[in-house]
Structure formats: structure tokens, C-alpha cells
Amino acid sequence: MRHYAELFESVNAGKRSVVLDLKDSGDRARALVLAAEADVVVEGFRPGVMERLGLDEPAVRAVNSKVIYCSISGYGQNGALSRAPGHDINYQAWAGSLAPEGGGATMPPLPVADLASGMTAAFGICAALLGRDAGGEGTYLDISMTDVMSTWTGSISATSESRSTPVPGYGLFTTLDGGQLALGVLNEQHFWSALCLELGLAEHADIPFAERTIRGTELNNAVAASVAGRERDEVVAALLKAGVPVAPVLDRRSMVAATPFPPFPIRLPMGPPLADAPTLDQHRGQAFRR
């Protein structure tokens, strides 16, 4: 992952690095020493690998009965696909997220299955730690990347199954200069009214949501025509000022230029900034808790 420098830095800031050859008996013993001190052990191998290496959940629990042991894999620890190889695009394909409405799929811009499963695992680990600290025991978590994406994709399409017309004011719209903006107006009347007044569609401002859903195509076309006559940044600024949920559609380069996002997505009220991602094996020989 170090070859993908930007992503690597963003998800490994503040961590420490020790390289261990888990096929070497000495390094495997060192891994168990570290695991004995740990609150959580996370592994991302295919099912069966940690057992062959002697570092699976029973082996770790033998030296640390209170540990939270979390396995993240493509297809889960059991089932017909559990031993199949895969990467992010495979998990998204199985989960239906590459072409949720059918038809041709497109390459995903982000490794969403990888990132979503990591975040899902973090929530599960936090819940397990709270349960343990409230008097429970250590536990085992089995996180399937495909399962995570399946729950995000959903079994029923909100666009093709639940409604036959679009929700006016919700979606992507092209501007005069060839840019795009994203509008997020749903059922809220005040958002819809503000949108209409700013776009010169005052005659539609008082239409209630139920009627808007029936007249979705007509009203969405009116919104699109108005947006198409204005420059992206100008109309985004005007809509934001009017209190409309809107955002410019940015690429990675323009996103960085527009907004200084933090390198770590959780903003903490105090404490020093996170250190850079560690160099390979930077912390060899150090104790787990420094």
C-alpha cells in the first residue's frame, strides 16, 4: 500500500510499524508477546492463514483471554467463497454496488469496500470493548467486505423500484461552464422554496412534497434548465447563501484546493497532531505500549 502514497498516509498517520516474519518461530513468538498486551488484534488474511501460522484467535486468546480479535476478509470466515481470492473491485461486484440498477458497470473511483469494512470493523471493535469493560468477555468479530457492501447497496433500488420519477432538486446538474453541482433537496419544504426562489422558479416554490414527487420529471427539468444558465461556482455560492443543500462536484485536485480537509477524519478538541505514517519497521524492538 505504500505505493499508493496519499491513501497510505491518510489511513496510517499516528501508527507504529514493526515487521515480523510470521513463518519464523522467533518472530511468531514476538507477535504473541505483543498480542498478550493488546486490547485488540486485527488481521486481514484469507481464512485459514492465521491458523496455519499459529496466530489465530484461539492461539491469541490463550495468552490474552480478554482480547477482541477481529478478522477482516473478502467473503467472511465461512461459506462457499470464503477461501476465494479477491480485492476491492471483486467484493463490490459480488455485492451489486458496481451496477446497482443493472446495465453496464463503471470502475469505482475509490476502494469503498476496503474503506467501509475498516470503518465497520472499528465500530464493532468499539462496541466489543465497551461490552468487555462493562463486565463482559473478549470476543471474536468476523467482518466480510462483501457483506458490508451488500448492506450499503441494499436489496431494493430507491430510484427504479420505489419511485418512477426523480425527486426534483436532488441529484447532479450541469452548469453553463460545463461543471456540475450536487443538489440535496428532498422532502424539506424550506429547502425547496429557497431553491426555487434563487433559481427564478418562484411559481413552483410552494408546491408540497407529495405533488413534487408526482411532477418530478417536469420540475427537475425546470431546475436543470435554470442551473444550466449559470456558472458553477456562482450558483453554488448563491444557493449556499440561500440555505440550500448544494455542493460543487470536485475532483481530487480541486477538492484539496477548495477546502483544507484534515488528514484524519475525526477532529479532536485537543492534543498534538498525529505523527506521519511510520517508515517500514520503524518501531522494531519497542514494546506495544511504548
Image (cartoon, rainbow, N blue to C red):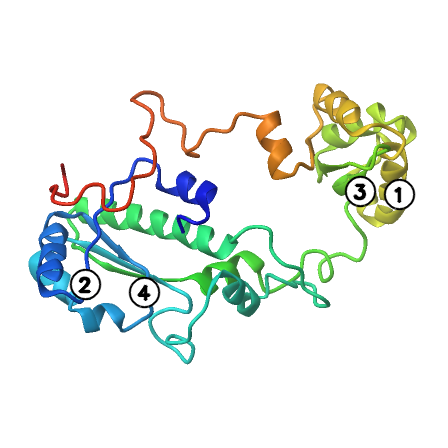
Q: Which residue is mark 1?
A: 221
Q: Nearer the viewer, mark 1 or mark 2?
A: 2
The residue under the point 15% across, 67% down is 58
Depth check, front residue: 28 or 168? 28
Q: Amino acid at mark 4?
A: Phe
Q: Which residue is mark 4?
A: 45
Q: Earlier in the sequence, mark 1 or mark 3?
A: 3
Q: Amino acid at mark 3?
A: Pro
Q: Earlier in the sequence, mark 2 or mark 3?
A: 2
Q: Which residue is mark 2?
A: 22
Q: Amino acid at mark 1?
A: Asn
Q: Earlier in the sequence, mark 3 or mark 4?
A: 4
Q: Are marks 2 and 3 in contact (CB under 8 Å)?
A: no
The residue under the point 14% across, 53% down is 35
Could you tell me how far apart the alpha carbons at marks 1 and 2 are, in whole angstroms?
Answer: 60 Å
Q: Amino acid at mark 2?
A: Leu
- The circle on residue 168 is 3
Query: In the picture provided, is 136 more to the left or to the right than 189?
Result: left
- State the SS at label 3: loop
Q: Are marks 2 and 4 in contact (CB under 8 Å)?
A: no
